[in-house]
Image: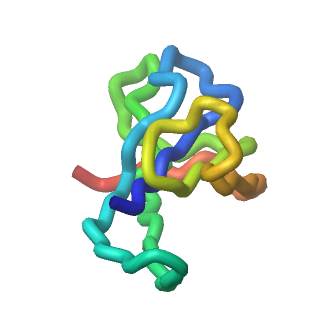
Amino acid sequence: MAELYVKDEKASTPRPICQLEGFERIHLKKGETKTVTFTITPRQLSMINKKKERVVEPGWFTFFVGGKQPDGSSDIQSGRINFTGKMITLEK
C-alpha cells in the first residue's frame, strides 16, 4: 500500500498532525519498484476557518509518502511546498 499524508505546518485553526489524502494498493515482488502518482487538489489542502469558510491558507505543507503513517522511519519519503498565494476561498 502506498499512502500519502499531508501536514499543514501552521494553520490558523487546529488541524490534525497529518491527514491521509491518498492511497493506492500495489503489489511488489522482492526487488521490484513501481512509480505511484498522486494528484493533490486545493480541497485536500483546505480547512474550515473561524468564519466557517473552506479556505486554503498560504504557508508550508509537508507531504509524506510511504507504506504507513509518518513516524520518522527511513521508508517514508517527504517533501515540502510553500503555498505563497493569497488565501483561496473554495466554493461549496
- Vertical position of residue 43 compared to residue 34: above or below: above
Task: Tell me if 27 is positioned left or right of 64 in this view.
Answer: left
- Vertical position of residue 39 compared to residue 91: above or below: below
Residue 46, by quadrant, is top left
Task: Tell me if 11 is positioned left or right of 51 in this view.
Answer: right
Residue at 61% over, 26% down: 11
Residue in front for this viewpoint, 69 or 6: 69
* Snapshot colouring: rainbow
Q: Position of residue 20 (x, y in %)?
A: 38, 43
- Vertical position of residue 69 compared to residue 67: above or below: above
> Which quadrant, please, contains the N terminus?
bottom left
- Vertical position of residue 23 compared to residue 19: above or below: below
Residue 37 visible, this angle = no
Residue 51, by quadrant, is top left
Q: Position of residue 50 (x, y in %)?
A: 45, 17
Residue in front for this viewpoint, 32 or 40: 32
Residue 49, by quadrant, is top left
Q: Position of residue 19 (x, y in %)?
A: 42, 37
| Extreme residue toward the left, this view | 92
Residue 47 visible, this angle = yes
Residue at 69% over, 27% down: 10
Residue in front for this viewpoint, 37 or 73: 73
- Total numbered badges shown on the rendered structure: 0
Residue at 70% over, 46% down: 74
Q: Position of residue 35 (x, y in %)?
A: 50, 84
Residue at 30% over, 67% down: 24
Task: Tell me if 29 is positioned left or right of 66 in this view.
Answer: left
